[in-house]
Amino acid sequence: MADGDAVKSKHADLPVRIVSALVMLAIAGGALWAGGLVWQIFIAIVALICFSEFFALVIKATSNALYRLAAAIAGGLYIGAASAALAAFPLAVVIGVIAVVVATDVGAYFSGRTIGGPKIAPRISPSKTWAGLIGGALAAGLVSAGFFLSNMSEPGLSPMLLVAFLIGALLAVLAQAGDFFESWLKRKAGAKDSSNLIPGHGGVFDRIDGLLPVALASSVLWTLHP
């Protein structure tokens, strides 16, 4: 394939991806705005779809019944606990968690594409670079610090601002770890995506793989916060 044809092929589904993203944003945003039972039902549906995609990958990855059972239990606890945390968070915390994950993805994408450099684990995820990891962590740290400043009565520099930045950066590392975990599982299963449910985006698990560990860690932080 010529270089021009490769570029066209790579971006051929861009309109579909944009439309799908807008639809997902509208549905999730509407459920979050409605709150209460609507938000909880939305989270439950997303969790069930995510688990079904996760287990389908497990079935493709191994024929060992014991491994499948262990994966089903671990995956159910992992996805269930993260979903329960998102359902229980106040609106501001949900927005903050999502903002950190989005900042991680955006920062990692642009820094990885701009700087490039050594890959983190090319056998698992060939496109992930150390530059992308650092860029994602910096972006998430800035978003976290921004949320901290917006909640202060008198915004200004303080040691807690640095703590907020570091928390965001660490959450970014967790988000990318969640991405790596799903990439590893898909490679074991010989699958490109967790499903083809969302045109141009793959499956639900593909969209929230980084959100799950961040939600779990944020639940602990929310419990411990003064």
Image (spheres, rainbow, N blue to C red):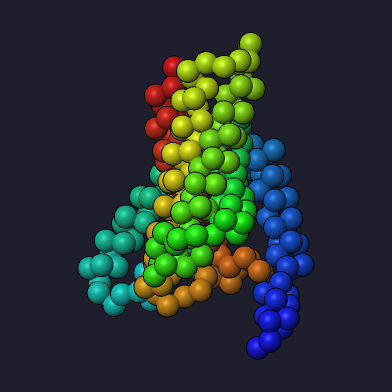
Q: Residue at x 47, y 75 (%)?
A: 191
Where does residue 190 sit, x and y in percent of width and height?
Answer: 42, 77
In the foreground, 192 or 44: 192
Question: Residue 218 in the image: x percent, y percent?
Answer: 45, 35
Report the number of discs. 0
Q: Nearer the viewer, residue 183 or 224?
A: 183
The quarter holding residue 81 reads: top left
Q: How far across and how far down the image is residue 131, in percent?
A: 51, 52
Residue 64 visible in the current orientation: yes
119 is higher (above) or lower (below) than 192 = above
Q: Is residue 206 above or below residue 88?
A: below
Name the residue: 74% across, 55% down. Answer: 22
Residue 225 found in image quarter: top left
Q: Is residue 7 left or right of residue 75?
A: right
User: Farthest residue toward the bottom?
Assistant: 1
Quarter of the picture holding the C terminus = top left
Camera-side residue of 87 and 139: 139
Quadrant of the image occupied by residue 12: bottom right
Q: Residue furthest top?
A: 154
Say left or right for 11 vs 179. Answer: right
Residue drawn 49% across the image and 25% down it: 162
Q: What is the quadrant of the N terminus in the image?
A: bottom right
